[in-house]
């Protein structure tokens, strides 16, 4: 009756990642109204710097495009649906993108295609680069939403590139080759490798060495490199951010084949904290990709009203400089608060310098070194401790026990409450003996919660959200 | 050549084929307009854009409302307190107030004969995104939909390009005013079956683009019983619903199925604010399905084209203002009716007839008597003359897959009154001149000669840097002055 797409679960939204969001919805934490509710730490949003944006808006009230007397651009905006995008907006975007990269690279607005969020940008790019049944290599752990964004409607497969904690989850040439061979054995044609840099969920920037490995690999195999750089403006510490384009340019690859196989995805959702405005983009030096992606952007253009507002905002260079500096300061402070709070609870994090989250090592709290144990721990933390964090399995991590914990989407006080809860939980766990307490407390819980039927039942309800 | 071949293997088939439909000669008209756009003062001999189905007649009403309601914008002093909540809001259910306002608006537009459920309202990236999403939900690659012709030129891309869907046209004829007949549907369906094409549904636009007519109750009931019998889907694109400016009134498919015993899981509506309100830039598309599974699936897919929360917020406020909406709909109808009348009566006076219509932002003009030969070639030749001599960009029927040559879609709501007068005068002058000077034989010879002098041909690829075929308009980057705030932001 319906399409295969509509009738299957290939949208990927049955994963624990989304289920946690649902459970949160049922009893969300509020300092006053619901102080025992669940604290949302599974949402990679940046809420730390809205005051700066609001203050800009107060000083620039006609960003709506209407002037009480004189010229108004409302009509032009309401009619503007040119899929090339508002020129003013794209001009500002490329300058902003360059600024984030320390002005070490320059971008051409003609090579920028707007899309409705990075969600749409990623899907569109895959539609342009790969046919149904072909494959992409993705280093693990990766953003859970990729299973929907890259595979669902495109029909493209993901072949994971296994990264391990033994070297800080860095991508190695060996891992890339191994994944490529695995794909070959499955008769899957690999069209490209997609990385997120800075990484979600790791919260780290890629080293130059990693980027070079990737580029070399892409040259050897004649495939694309897609670099999802949506968190590039959230880098708050050393060693700093190197874009794939910078790495390629530093190797003098500008006039070679691979240059037209390197593509960047970007968005304002993380850096500026504006996910609701749906501003995503593709940057590519490949004319055919630009041409095709531009036509496809018809399926998800950015509202002209939003393009206009943001072009004015980004045009104010004093504002953007101030924002970038202050935002990074606040992110760093918040991260340090989370890391030290976890440390007090005897929990370590992967050393990271970017992103809106920590990659937390809870392996020592597992009853055993298997994913079922990770799920048990996750559910305990969700339902008993009242924290919605994201289990590594939902990010396709190959080692159980890692969790992504977000820190930028809540107030200072809420984070303190969360830290206290974790500390109490860790103390309880170490006192009572973890393995035993799990088996005792969790057996009925496990029966109820670990079955896939339950999983399916929850996900069929209307209330799932999709966030990074 | 080598690069093209390499590129073809390197990129997807979708990226390198032309199922996006933008290489058709249809877009040469846009190019001509872009090169030489009409302006009453600065370029009075330029090409007048009549190929753009935009509704520009009621902006004064909207502007007035926005100025009177500063708290509807998150960018004003009155509204900025809401900024943070709105800027973070990316829930693909959409703002509750927005869905409620849209549902109420749709009900109003349908004459308040039916209530729309806000929980079935799903967002998409314009109707473009909505149509594609519906196809992704209902059909697999290689499946087909029946589409009554003539139909919107953009369907080639929206329904087929990335979805892999096939379109099977259902030819409608001028002999019965292009009505969709049961016989035509059955014939198209059977033909598809014989060719082993799996038909999953019917999709149509009501009011029709390009005809400007609405479906009568009988036809709609017949459509519902047809899809019910074949157990296939019916998708009604109702984006021109509020542009109906005279009787008979618009009837939504939602109203029809209220009184019919049919499988509601087969019925789906696509809606948008681009035509009724004149907001194509805001990208407000809606999928409304009576099938729960489709609602859920489309909602997940809406992640690929959510409406900007800034826009949702503004429109939630605007569309819930019942007094404003009532006044707007009434006034819009009045102005559309007036425009329509000015053109159609004016053309009648020089012997050009149009299909009788009461909706849409265009009329369907009958130029068959002026064709040198009753073929698509003949139509395209006439069309090129109209662009280059008469300097009007109108759309030839063949670009809408019309099975009869000689019909043209002419848009009338995207210009001011002054331009209307100029456009009308040009057409009349052209037709009258033709009548005075020539016998039928000489007339056709004259056009033939002229068409040879034209500088473009249908086989030429259009220049990407000049064109945004999706909607070439005075609002494309070329048309904006370098000092316009849309080109250079003010700091």
Image (cartoon, coloured by chain):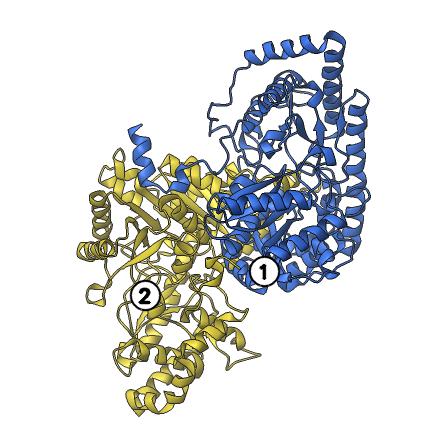
Chain colours: A yellow, B blue
Q: Is residue A403 above or below residue A436?
A: above
Q: Identify the disc placed on residue B237.
A: none
- Residue A109 appearing in the image: no
Position of A239 with respect to A71 (left or right) is left
Mark 2 or mark 1, which is nearer to you?
2
Q: Quadrant of the C terminus of chain A?
A: bottom left
Please name the residue shown 75% across and 59% down the image: B114
Please name the residue shown 60% across and 19% down the image: B381
Q: Identify the disc placed on residue A396.
A: 2
State the residue in front, B181 or A79: B181
State the residue in front, A99 or A299: A299
| Residue that protrudes farthest toward the front in the picture | B194
Q: CA distance from mark 2 to mark 1?
A: 29 Å
Q: Secondary structure at mark 2?
A: loop
Q: Is residue A101 above or below residue B107?
A: above
Q: Identify the disc placed on residue B94.
A: 1
Q: Chain of mark 2?
A: A
Residue B487: quarter of image? top right
State the residue in front, B254 or A440: B254
- Residue A18 appearing in the image: yes
Q: Secondary structure at mark 1?
A: loop
Q: In x, y percent, where is residue B124?
A: 56, 52
Q: In x, y percent, where is residue B183?
A: 66, 44
2 and 1 marks on the same chain: no
Q: In x, y percent, where is residue B279?
A: 65, 44
Please name the residue shown 79% across and 21% down the image: B351
The crowding category of the residue bearing disc 1, from other C-alpha atoms within 10 Å (few below 14, some 14 to 19, many at least 20), is many
Q: In x, y percent, where is residue B226?
A: 65, 53
């Amino acid at each position: 009756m319906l399409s295969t797409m509509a009738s299957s679960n290939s949208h990927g939204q049955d994963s624990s990642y989304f289920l946690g969001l649902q459970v949160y919805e049922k009893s969300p934490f509020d300092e006053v109204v619901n102080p025992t509710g669940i604290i949302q730490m599974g949402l990679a949003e940046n809420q730390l710097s809205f005051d700066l944006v609001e203050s800009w808006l107060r000083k620039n009230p006609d960003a709506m495009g209407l002037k009480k007397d004189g010229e108004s651009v409302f009509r032009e905006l309401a009619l503007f649906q040119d899929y090339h995008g508002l020129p003013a907006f794209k001009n500002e975007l490329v300058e902003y993108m360059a600024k984030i990269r320390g002005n070490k690279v320059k971008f051409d607005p003609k090579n920028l295609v707007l899309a409705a969020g990075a969600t749409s940008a990623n899907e569109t790019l895959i539609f342009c680069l790969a046919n149904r049944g072909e494959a992409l290599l993705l280093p693990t752990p990766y953003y859970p939403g990729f299973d929907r964004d890259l595979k669902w409607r495109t029909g493209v497969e993901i072949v994971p590139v296994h990264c391990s904690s033994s070297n800080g989850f860095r991508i190695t040439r060996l891992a890339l080759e191994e994944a490529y061979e695995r794909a070959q054995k499955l008769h899957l044609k690999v069209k490209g490798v997609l990385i997120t840099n800075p990484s979600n969920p790791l919260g780290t920037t890629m080293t130059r060495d990693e980027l070079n490995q990737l580029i070399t690999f892409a040259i050897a195999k004649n495939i694309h490199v897609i670099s999802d750089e949506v968190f590039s403006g959230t880098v708050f510490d050393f060693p700093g951010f190197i874009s794939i384009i910078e790495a390629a340019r530093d190797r003098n690859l500008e006039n070679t084949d691979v240059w037209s196989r390197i593509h960047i995805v970007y968005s304002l959702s993380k850096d500026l904290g504006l996910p609701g405005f749906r501003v995503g983009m593709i940057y590519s030096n490949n004319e055919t990709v630009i041409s095709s992606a531009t036509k496809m952007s018809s399926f998800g253009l950015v509202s002209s009203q939003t393009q206009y507002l943001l072009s004015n905002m980004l045009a104010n260079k004093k504002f953007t400089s101030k924002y970038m500096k202050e935002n990074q300061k606040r992110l760093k402070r918040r991260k340090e608060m989370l890391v030290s709070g976890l440390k007090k609870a005897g929990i370590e994090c992967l050393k990271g310098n970017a992103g809106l989250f920590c990659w937390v090592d809870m392996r020592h709290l597992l009853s055993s070194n298997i994913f079922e144990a990770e799920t048990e721990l996750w559910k305990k933390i969700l339902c008993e401790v009242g924290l919605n964090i994201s289990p590594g399995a939902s990010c396709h991590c190959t080692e159980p026990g890692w969790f992504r914990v977000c820190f930028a989407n809540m107030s200072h006080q809420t984070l303190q409450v969360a830290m206290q809860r974790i500390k109490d939980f860790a103390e309880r766990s170490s006192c009572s003996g973890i393995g035993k307490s799990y088996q005792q407390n969790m057996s009925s819980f496990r029966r109820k919660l670990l079955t896939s039927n339950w999983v399916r039942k929850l996900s069929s309800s209307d209330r799932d959200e999709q966030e990074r | 050549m080598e690069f093209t071949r390499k590129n073809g293997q390197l990129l997807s088939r979708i990226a390198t084929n032309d199922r996006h439909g933008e290489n058709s000669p249809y877009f040469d008209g846009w190019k001509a307009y872009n090169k030489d756009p009409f302006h009453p003062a600065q370029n009075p001999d330029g090409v007048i854009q009549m190929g753009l189905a935009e509704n520009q007649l009621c902006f004064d009403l909207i502007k007035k409302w926005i100025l009177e309601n500063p708290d509807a914008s998150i960018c004003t002093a009155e509204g900025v307190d809401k900024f943070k909540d709105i800027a973070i809001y990316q829930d693909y259910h959409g703002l509750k107030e927005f869905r409620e306002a849209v549902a109420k608006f749709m009900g109003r537009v349908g004459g308040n004969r039916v209530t729309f459920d806000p929980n079935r309202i799903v967002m998409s990236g314009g109707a473009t995104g909505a149509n594609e999403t519906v196809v992704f939900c209902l059909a697999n690659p290689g499946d087909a939909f029946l589409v009554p012709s003539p139909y919107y030129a953009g369907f080639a891309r929206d329904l087929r390009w990335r979805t892999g869907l096939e379109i099977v046209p259902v030819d409608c004829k001028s002999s019965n005013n292009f009505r969709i007949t049961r016989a035509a549907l059955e014939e198209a369906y059977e033909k598809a079956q014989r060719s082993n094409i799996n038909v999953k549904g019917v999709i149509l636009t009501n009011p029709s683009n390009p005809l400007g007519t609405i479906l009568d109750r009988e036809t709609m009931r017949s459509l519902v019983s047809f899809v019910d019998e074949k157990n296939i889907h019916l998708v009604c694109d109702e984006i021109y619903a509020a542009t109906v400016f005279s009787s008979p009134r618009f009837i939504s498919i939602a109203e029809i199925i209220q009184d019919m015993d049919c499988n509601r899981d087969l019925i789906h509506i696509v809606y948008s604010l681009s035509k009724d309100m004149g907001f194509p830039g805001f990208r407000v598309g809606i999928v409304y399905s009576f099938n729960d599974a489709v609602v859920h699936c489309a909602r997940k897919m809406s992640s690929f084209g959510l409406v900007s929360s800034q826009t949702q917020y503004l429109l939630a406020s605007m569309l819930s203002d019942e007094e404003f909406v009532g006044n707007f709909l009434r006034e819009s109808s009045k102005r559309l009716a007036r425009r329509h009348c000015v053109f159609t009566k004016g053309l009648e006076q020089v012997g050009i007839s149009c299909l009788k219509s009461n909706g849409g932002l265009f009329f369907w003009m009958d130029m068959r008597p002026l064709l040198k030969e009753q073929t698509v070639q003949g139509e395209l030749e006439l069309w090129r003359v109209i662009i280059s001599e008469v300097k009007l960009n109108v759309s030839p029927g063949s670009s809408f897959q019309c099975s009869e040559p000689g019909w043209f879609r002419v848009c009338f709501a995207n210009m001011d009154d002054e331009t209307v007068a100029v456009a009308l005068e040009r057409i009349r002058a052209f037709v009258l001149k033709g009548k005075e000077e020539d016998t039928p034989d000489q007339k056709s010879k004259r056009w033939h000669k002229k068409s040879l002098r034209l500088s473009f041909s249908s086989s030429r690829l259009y220049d990407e840097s000049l064109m945004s075929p999706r909607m070439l308009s005075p609002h494309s980057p070329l048309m904006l002055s370098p000092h316009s705030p849309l080109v250079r932001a003010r700091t």
